[in-house]
Amino acid sequence: MKLHELRAPEGATKKPKRKGRGTATGQGKTAGRGMNGQKSRSGGGVRPGFEGGQMPLTRTTPKRGFTNPFKKQWAILNVEDLNVFENGTVVTPDMLIESGIVGKVADGIKVLGDGNLEKNVTVQAHKFSKSAAEKIESAGGKAEVI
């Protein structure tokens, strides 16, 4: 089989309805648009969301607040999650992603101070909470901001 021999299987494509080709076709004269009215005219119809003069749903629903398009999405990590690593390890964001502790990193990693840390590790992350930095340093490790 060659490229020019390719064809759609039989019955896969229908012929388009030929509208406005005489009254015998069943789609003649008004071509399925009905008799009169806005929708029967060329270029006729209403804009999306128009409800015939009734107050549209998009205007009746309450709108509150503001969504900041520049908001940062931090991947969050707790101090107790770092107990997986050996003593003296330098924990980098790449290591955290490989080990599966952190999922998708959008804008960076933030370490929070939930739980206890028994290992002395050097943690490299984009942000640390005060309690997380204290717990890492009290365990003998370092909190390095990238």
Image: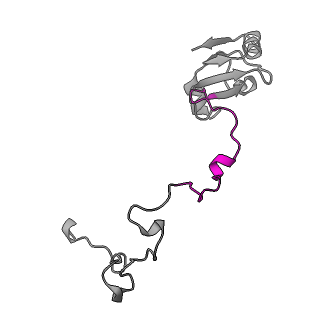
Residue 52, quarter of picture: bottom right
Q: Is residue 89 visible?
A: no
Q: Is residue 81 visible?
A: yes
Instruction: State which quarter of the image contains the C terminus.
Output: top right
Instruction: State which quarter of the image contains the N terminus.
Output: bottom left
Q: Is residue 8 above or below residue 143?
A: below
By secondary structure, the bulk of the magenta-drawn segment is best described as loop
Determine the residue positioned at 47% across, 65% down: 38
Q: Is residue 78 left or right of residue 73?
A: right
Which is more toward the observer, 67 or 137?
67
Determine the residue positioned at 62% across, 12% down: 144
Where residue 94 sits: x, y (%)? 55, 26
- Which residue ends up furthest to the bottom in the rendered image? 24
Which is more toward the observer, 92 or 111?
111
Q: In this view, does 37 lie above or below 81?
A: below
Which is more toward the observer, 41 or 72?
41
The span shown in magenta is 48-74
Where residue 51 sits: x, y (%)? 60, 58
Q: In this view, does 133 lie to the left or right of 58?
A: right
Residue 5, quarter of picture: bottom left
Residue 40, quarter of picture: bottom left
